[in-house]
Amino acid sequence: MISFGLTDEQELVRNTLREFAADVLRPAAREADENSRLPEGLLDQAWELGLTNTQLPAVIGGGDEPRSPITNALVLEELGCGDAALGLAVAQPSLFAFAVADLGTPEQKKRWLPLFTGPRFPAASVAWMEPSPVFDALALQTQAEPKHGSFVLSGKKRCVLLGDRAEHFLVIARNAQSAKTGFGALDAFVVPKGAKGLTVTETEKNLGLRGLPTAGLVLDRVEVAAADRLGGEEGIDARRLLALSRTGGAAVLLGLARGVMEYAIPYAKDRVAFDEAIAQKQAIAFILSDMQVETDALRWLVWKAASFLEQGLDATRESVLAWTTAAEQAMKIADNGVQVLGGHGFIREHPVEMWYRHARTLSVLEGVAGI
């Protein structure tokens, strides 16, 4: 029998994150957007919640709590509802850490996971996207060339979250000598910030998510040891890594869509036009009801993908459905939120215009979140 109810622990986690998102993220979101800068101390404050380190093995200093992609989907929804830009910044180390925990060799886990068990926020990021007008997550231009017990990385990356401060990057590249195609040709390499040949570009200027610093990477024949290839000699199953990312991104977009809906409904009930609340007008009522239906439907898709990941199943199809639906519906809901607010939807007094920009930007990004 399928149950859609949450456990007591999941209820506690969701309520804690909902409170954090409402009390910390949302009040800081507008200033971060206006200044294109993360609030001082926010990342360390969020790190104290233990969203990542408590789910790592105790033998390397973690909390040894059982990893639950479903619970993490709940977390990302709440962070996205508070503010997608700041929420992604808070959650960014998780994709790196969980990729190592899921796909790394025992030696790699002992080496890198302790980076995520300290008291301070560890800036680490995944570099997947590339500066291509038609980006394909499977057809990467960045390539890794085997060379006498090491690999030489060449290529360019863009939209690397926290790229301005990350100390380690998980660079996704195509194995230049692999006979495989698609997922099978992809490898992941841990590259330290100071690696010879690695250049971090200036912080990018984006339409939305402006409070979240992103940068580009230029890899000019960056040589990394074979031991820095995630998964060792066997490499990785890139399907799981991309499914983790797509499901996480869908959960953030779900939270954003819910935030728009929860803002638009009370506004429509309070806004009076021609002696009647606009929520009573049929056109507005239909928009609001569609928001609810689409948000609930999206949540089931996200939970299904997360459930497949939690069971260790191939979640490629489920994560694609969740991600593509989230990108489409969050954009539609954000646009309708602007329409419900009318002229107020375009001014900075209300956050809906910012959420619209967030939805437009996040809907075209991949490799930016993980559960």
Image (tube, helix red, strand yellow):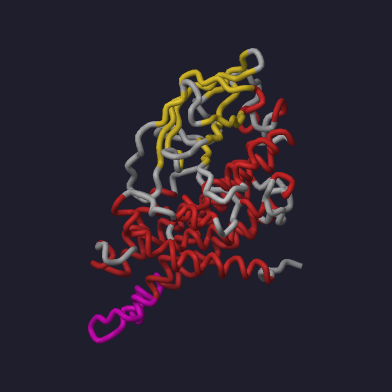
Relative to 134, is 180 above or below?
above
Quadrant of the image occupied by residue 225: top right
Residue 217 placement (x, y as % from top left)? 44, 30
- Answer yes or no: is residue 169 visible: yes
Residue, far right: 1
Nearer-the-camera pick, 136 or 162 = 162
- Residue 159 highlighted magenta (yes or no): no
Residue, far front: 119
- Residue 278 highlighted magenta (yes or no): yes
Q: Which region is colored magenta?
A: 266-287
Q: Residue at x 33, y 54 (%)?
A: 33
Relative to 59, is 198 above or below?
above
Relative to 49, is 153 above or below?
above
Quadrant of the image occupied by residue 133: top left
Q: Residue at x 70, y 38 (%)?
A: 110
Tell me: 36 left or right of 83: left
